[in-house]
Amino acid sequence: MHPTLLKIGFLEIHTYGVFVALGFFAAFKLLLFYGKKSDFSLTLIETLTFLVFIFSLLGARLFYVLISWQEFAGNPSDIFKIWQGGLVFWGGFLGGAITVIIFSIKHKMPFWKLADIFAPALAIGHSIGRLGCFSAGCCYGKETNSFFGVVFPENCLAPAGIKLIPTQLISSILLFLLFLILIVLWKRKKFDGQIFLIYSVLFSVGRFFIEFLRGDFRGNPILGLTPTQIISVLTFIVSIFLLFRQAEQMFGEGGFGANKCSGRTNVRGT
């Protein structure tokens, strides 16, 4: 709950930006680790990571601006002040996914194997980034009288002086648990795409229910659901379908329980 971490003269370091940077650094290190285990070229992984960071950041900000345009209508220059918070995960997810797809096609890298190394990195990076949301006061929860409610100060983005559900911390904890699940599942991985699609399924479920606790503006509801919840439902359905399709292609009609060996492929790219 400290938006400004350090201020020396004109230099002001925002806590939100620091946690986003820490999340990116942790995700990057994990990408290199799993990239090496998957026999990818680390040079290509480094290049892809930089591109994903840029385009996911743009996608996350663009999505936020679209659903919260009333915040910027009077002062459009605030669109560029991302250090104050205001990033939507699904926008960043889409921007990053498109980047990975294009990159994998260009460099002839197997997409699903590539997607798998991103899943644990996404979970831990997002978990750390949510701490930045808590510091800035964005993505806050609804008012509550519960003992675990938190009160934000006046200089935060959240309403000050009232108890709010700490949705940022809840999200951070759930994402860290998801990260632990993924690294355990990685050791038991049976087919390409399994880790990423399980990540997508579990994250969609968690995000759907977290939305019920959010107190900030979530966009105009459709059929009683927020835009984020609708995207979560669609992502869940598509991910479940792809998960079983990948399993069937790998194991045939026996699905996950079948026992079928596969050869090792060279996935270092060009």
Image (cartoon, rainbow, N blue to C red):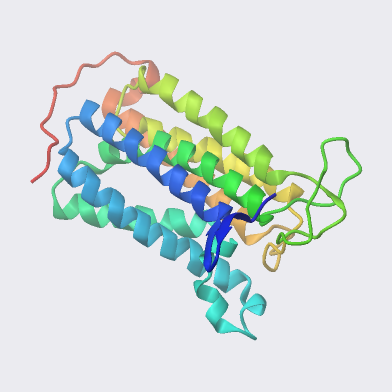
Asked whether the viewer can see residue 86, the reply is no
- Looking at this view, name the residue that lies furthest to the left: 270
Asked whether the viewer can see residue 129, the reply is yes
Nearest the eye: 154 or 30: 154
Nearest the eye: 60 or 153: 153
Above or below residue 155? Residue 126 is above
* Residue name at image x 72 percent, y 53 percent: 140
Whole-percent x, y for residue 225 in the image: 70, 57
- Looking at this view, name the residue that lies furthest to the top: 259
- Looking at this view, name the residue that lies furthest to the bottom: 74
Mark count: 0
* Residue name at image x 50 percent, y 43 percent: 126
* Residue name at image x 56 percent, y 28 percent: 177
Whole-percent x, y for residue 49 in the image: 29, 49
Q: Is residue 228 left or right of residue 47?
A: right
Q: Is residue 91 left or right of residue 156?
A: left
Nearest the eye: 74 or 180: 74
Whole-percent x, y for residue 183 in the image: 42, 24
Nearest the eye: 36 or 223: 36
* Residue name at image x 18 percent, y 46 percent: 44
Give the quarter of the image for residue 84.
bottom right
- Looking at this view, name the residue that lies furthest to the right: 145
Whole-percent x, y for residue 143 in the image: 85, 51
Give the quarter of the image for residue 7.
bottom right
